[in-house]
Amino acid sequence: MAINWFPGHMHKAQKEIKEIIHQIDVVIEVCDARLPFSSENPMITEIRGEKPLIKILNKSDLADPELTKVWIAHLESQHNVKALALTTQEPQGAKLIPDLIRKLAPNKDEPGKQINAMIMGIPNVGKSTLLNTLVGKVKAKVGNEPAVTKSQQRIRLEDGLYLFDTPGMLWPKIANENSGYRLAVSGGVKDTAFEHEEIACFAAEYLLQAYPERLKRRYQIEELPEQDYLFLEELGRKRGCVRAGGHVDFHKASEILINEIRDNTLGPITFETPEMVAKEQVYFTQLEADRLAEREAKKLARGRGRKNKPKKKKR
């Protein structure tokens, strides 16, 4: 599943970030705790350079708490990274962020000096809601649709501490196809960017392996099918999604599963682990290398074909 969704304001935001990054002391990236890898922006690593990074695992109340601990340990094993899990229901956790910023920029934490932090995040990870909690009043526009913030804003948090807010920014192409599916399941991209049936099958395949007991309890299925599409058909029958002739309405069944994942009806779920992601990165890196090699081979073959093509004789 290839998601290529890079609206004009996102391209503009990327350009603006690169122009002011030299003024920034600490970078904050807000991710979805259910998919800490798939919801991070790989361009941020390039943009921030050696600057300290605070990784916010937001919506952690929707994620598996044990796997959130695993992810925090994994992230903090990286150079100059501090990780913090937050929930939207308990805003007091966000109050730790200003002190954390000051600790990560000790050379600037003096009277008369100014600390600049920048907050980033892909669409729909709760960045604007977090920002409003930090400032104590509505400064950032909030919505449940991706890509609500359209322009950059500079906000005073405390004396000597300023925060630059940026629009939610996806990267031009998601190389790891599984990350694209996970973003779609969580609502990280607009529903118009994918087919419900496709991402429901992806989600069902994972849930059958990772959280089978929850599926049994929620949908009253004693023996779970092994295949994702068979599970969705059974779900559809249990929920009355049946058309004339006894055929299951696959689209309605898919919508039920997706919506019940997003609204936490199925309970806290994390869709990836560091080990899983490491294997996927190896696989998709090799896949991309193979694709490039194949394209180059075809290009070379076309070039040879043109050289060997007999020239037309002049009359």
Image (cartoon, helix red, strand yellow):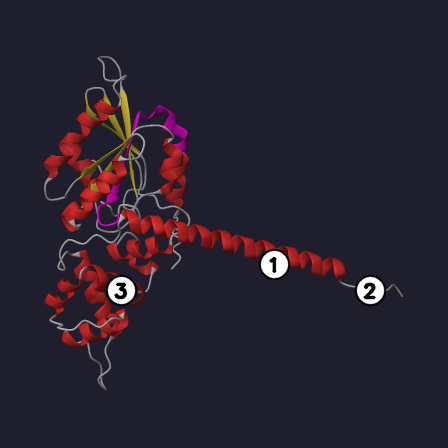
Look at 22% across and 40% down and name the residue there. Answer: 72
Mark 3 vs mark 2: give the one in front.
3
Amino acid type at circle 3 is Glu
Look at 18% across and 37% down and name the residue there. Answer: 132
Specify whether residue 32 is painted magenta. Answer: yes
- Compared to residue 247, the image places residue 60 above or below, namely above
For this orientation, the residue located farthest to the top is 111
- Residue nearest the viewer, comparing 19 with 266: 266
Look at 59% across and 53% down and name the residue there. Answer: 296
Disc 3 to disc 1, C-alpha distance? 36 Å
Q: Which residue is mark 1?
A: 298
Q: Quadrant of the C terminus?
A: bottom right
The numbered dot on residue 196 is none
Q: Which residues are magenta?
A: 16-35
Q: Of label 1 and label 2, which has the lower sequence position?
A: 1
Q: Secondary structure at mark 3?
A: helix
Disc 3 to disc 2, C-alpha distance? 58 Å
Q: Of label 3 and label 1, which has the lower sequence position?
A: 3
Decide if residue 23 is on the left or right side of residue 200: right
Q: Residues within 10 Å of mark 3 (few under 14, many from 20)?
A: some
Is residue 58 among the parts visible in the rendering?
no
- Compared to residue 108, the image places residue 234 above or below, namely below
Specify whether residue 222 is painted magenta. Answer: no
Q: Residues within 10 Å of mark 2 (few under 14, many from 20)?
A: few
Amino acid type at circle 1 is Lys
Mark 1 vs mark 2: give the one in front.
1
Task: Give coordinates of residue 51: x percent, y percent.
Answer: 33, 28
Q: Which residue is mark 3?
A: 205
Look at 19% across and 47% down and name the residue there. Answer: 67
Q: Could you tell me if the residues under marks 3 and 2 are in contact, i.e. CB atoms within 8 Å? A: no
Q: Which residue is mark 2?
A: 312
